Image (cartoon, grey):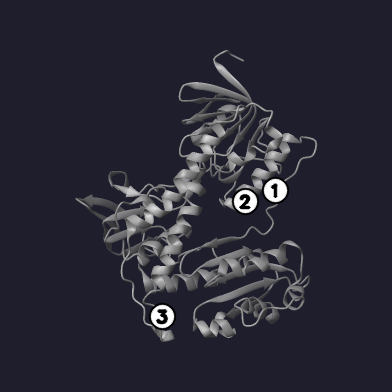
Amino acid sequence: MPESVEHFDLVVVGTGSGNSVLTPDFDDWRVALIERDTFGGTCLNRGCIPSKMFVYAADTARQAGHTGHLGVDTTLDGVRWPEIVGRVFGRIDPIAQGGEDYRRGLDNVAVFNGDARFTGHKVLEVDGQQVSGDHIVLAAGARPFIPPIPGLDGVAYHTSDTVMRLETLPDRMVILGGGYIAAELGHVFDAMGVSVTVVNRSERLLRAEDEDVSAAFTEIMAQRLDCARGAPISEISQAGSQITVRTEARDVAGDVLLVATGRIPNGEQLGVTRSGVELDDNGYVVTDEFLRTGVDGVWALGDICHAAQLKHTANEDTRAVAHNIAHPDDLRSPDYSGIPHAVFAHPQVAAVGATEQALRAEGRAYLRAVRPYRDTAYGWAMEDTASFAKVLADPETRLLLGAHIIGPQAPTLIQQLIQGMQFGLTVDDMARGQLYIHPALTEVVEQALLEL
């Protein structure tokens, strides 16, 4: 090894979930942590945590003025946006700095700030300094995808990385995309009083969800927001502070443009192929079931290596990688069975397992049941007319194949179905093998299971 290369027992690229690789097993190892951005990764600084803090405030703002049907008159007196931003990042930023300070204070850990690039076999360069490792963990995550739309590169646009730190609320916002990021942030800014237009090339929002959920969500959001759907974008331009998105159907204008068209992995930016690490056709690092790449001693976890791009799957990866590096004779694979997810928009969406369209495409036999919230006592009290729970089961084994909920508390309501699915309970066991609190909203899950 050349003298100019500093060698470590373990090198971790990315300090999101990658930071958690450093369990007590590595207290005696010489470790390098590499981070090009804020310590703590996307979830802490630009993703799950700050966005949900904004969502919670937006949920409260949205409720005001929408209670008249209950005989309760409410109004929204105002939104102090700078105060909301200050509250969110005033709590988050110290956590990121504290995490970095802690790691820098450890005798066995060196923290490198800067872009990492592979220059050769298991050798990385970080702002002119070269490091190598017996083990290297690729945990560099993903970044917003910027579509190749004519004119976009000449426009001052935001992504989810930056839009939550806007100093003031715009009057009008245009959001490109119809996935979970567009849905959640569209809810946030609309609830805060911004006139929001969503531009989506597909007719449906959340099109990756179960078809019934996607259709219902699209219908609800189209009543709430201006939605330009099913029309490809031909050009984007800016004149002064106004940004215009030209579609084949019509022009849409706003003061702020948010590009929320998905996220792509960062493996190519790291130049991983220079070390012999393989990328698939979508740019994800290729690993085996134990999260080993094709290069001995190089591992990958989280968004850089699989398309789920969820914090809870990245955490599962982290536990597996940390164990496998420390215990090479007892390798464990992460458990991806029935990966659940949720969309914290308004309405909320949660799902686990297969969609109905996927089962149909597979040619697999299934049973389905859909129960509206309004069929339960609590849903009736809420006067909810749009929300529902949908369950899909195997007609022979009676095991749950998929579950999909749209409506209030959806991410919480689905958890018992996740648990039942994970532990191999039949839908009959889940429906009849426990008491459901009456008149809690969980009865919508009970009723859906009983219908099967």
In this view of the protein, can residue 172 be seen by the observer? yes
Please, is residue 89 above or below residue 364 in the view? above
Please name the residue shown 72% across and 40% down the image: 323
Which quarter of the rendering shows the C terminus? bottom right
CA gap between label 1 and label 2 equals 8 Å
| Kind of residue at disc 1 | Pro
| Kind of residue at disc 3 | Thr
First-in-chain label (1 vs 2): 2
Left or right: 95 as drawn, with respect to 430: left
Residue picked out by circle 2: 313
First-in-chain label (3 vs 1): 3
Q: Residues within 10 Å of mark 1 (few under 14, many from 20)?
A: some
Please name the residue shown 67% across and 38% down the image: 23
Q: Residue furthest left?
A: 240
Q: Between residues 396 and 62, which one lies in front from this camera angle? A: 62
In this view of the protein, can residue 39 be seen by the observer? no
Of badges 3 and 1, the one in the foreground is 3
Q: Residues within 10 Å of mark 3 (few under 14, many from 20)?
A: some
Please name the residue shown 56% across and 42% down the image: 304
Q: Secondary structure at mark 3?
A: loop
Left or right: 82 as drawn, with respect to 270: left
Q: Secondary structure at mark 1?
A: loop
Residue picked out by circle 1: 334
Please, is residue 371 above or below residue 419 in the view? below
Q: Which mark is residue 238?
A: none
Residue 328, given in percent of the width and then of the height, sits at: 76, 35
Residue picked out by circle 3: 67
| Kind of residue at disc 2 | Thr
Of badges 2 and 3, the one in the foreground is 3
First-in-chain label (2 vs 3): 3
Q: Between residues 170 and 117, which one lies in front from this camera angle? A: 170
